């Protein structure tokens, strides 16, 4: 087998387009992929395979999934992420399959009134099932690059999935910061901007983003 490094031996490995890199088991390190240290662990799957055709020879097939090359992002402000999810999942041109709190609970045997259950047990809170799902939902840079508007409105579907009894008036979904704005390079407008604090509105204006009350 050639001693060439994994970078020169890249080829398509599976139907998802994940690039596979082949290297001697004793010689391969994650650093050779130039991956940032925080995502080395849990990103790489290793599989032993006799791919060379030589009896007794073993190589390590290292698959770095395509989604990590798409730069999966992390949000600082959960409320900003929810607004982005509402646009991508429940907007006029959805890019993600919708998630339903009701369907999730029914699959676990729940058959009561969702509004009452939410109000009685999670007043002024995000339902734990919704928080777990939306916080862990990975949004690639490609998806975020397609977001041109955000809507902050009490009737947004994502809020109803988080808190079915929410009346749209309390501050539990208020945006605290715009530190995530760099994740939305093509954002052009914000609808319902009057729900944002004045300093946040001023910051958006300074970036040339249209504000619509």
Image (cartoon, helix red, strand yellow):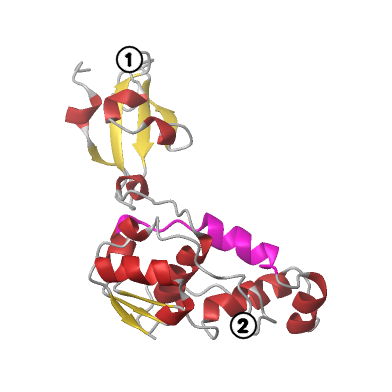
Task: Name the one closer to the observer, 15 or 114.
Answer: 114
Bin the neighbour count of mark 1 within 10 Å (Cα to Cα): few under 14, some 14-19, many 20 and up.
Answer: few
Write the start and end of the magenta stretch as one range: 125-141
Side of 84 where 207 appears, left or right: left
Disc on res. 27: 1
Say which element carries label 2: loop
Left or right position of 125 against 99:
right
Q: Is residue 131 magenta?
A: yes
Question: Which residue position holds label 2?
Answer: 169
Q: Earlier in the sequence, mark 1 or mark 2?
A: 1
Q: Residue at x 54, y 70 (%)?
A: 174
Disc 2 crowd, CA 10 A, few/some/many (<14, 14-19, 20+): few
Instruction: Please tell me in which quadrant of the rendered image residue 13 appears.
Output: top left
Query: Is residue 37 toward the left or the right of residue 79 in the image?
Result: left
Residue at 30% from the left image edge and 22% from the top image edge: 23
The N terminus: image quadrant = top left
Numbered disc total: 2
- Residue shown at 35% from the left, 81% from the top: 93
Q: Nearer the viewer, mark 1 or mark 2?
A: 2
Residue 113: image location, x then y, percent: 78, 84
Q: Is residue 192 above or below residue 16?
A: below
Q: CA distance from mark 1 to mark 2?
A: 59 Å
Say which of 190 and 122 sits in front. Answer: 190
119 or 128, which lies in front?
Answer: 119
Q: Position of residue 149 (x, y in %)?
A: 33, 76
Where's the C terminus, which quadrant? bottom left
Figure check: 15 above or below 147: above
């Amino acid at each position: 087998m050639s001693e060439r490094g994994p970078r020169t031996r890249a080829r398509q490995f599976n139907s998802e387009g994940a690039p596979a890199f082949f290297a001697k088991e004793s010689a391969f390190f994650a650093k050779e992929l130039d991956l940032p240290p925080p995502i080395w662990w849990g990103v790489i799957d290793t599989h032993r395979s006799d791919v060379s055709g030589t009896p007794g020879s073993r190589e390590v097939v290292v698959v770095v999934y395509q989604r990590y090359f798409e730069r999966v992002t992390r949000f600082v402000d959960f409320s900003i992420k929810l607004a982005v999810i509402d646009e991508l999942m429940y907007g006029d041109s959805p890019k993600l399959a919708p998630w339903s709190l009701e369907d999730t609970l029914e699959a676990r045997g729940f058959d009561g009134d969702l509004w009452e259950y939410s109000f009685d047990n999670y007043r002024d809170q995000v339902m734990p099932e919704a928080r777990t799902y939306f916080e862990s939902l990975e949004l690639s840079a490609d998806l975020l690059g397609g977001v041109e508007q955000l809507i902050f409105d009490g009737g947004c579907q994502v809020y109803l999935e988080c808190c079915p009894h929410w009346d749209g008036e309390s501050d539990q979904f208020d945006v605290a910061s715009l530190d995530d704005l760099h994740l939305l390079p093509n954002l052009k407008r914000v609808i319902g901007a009057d729900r944002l604090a004045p300093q946040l509105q001023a910051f958006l204006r300074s970036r040339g983003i249209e504000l619509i009350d």
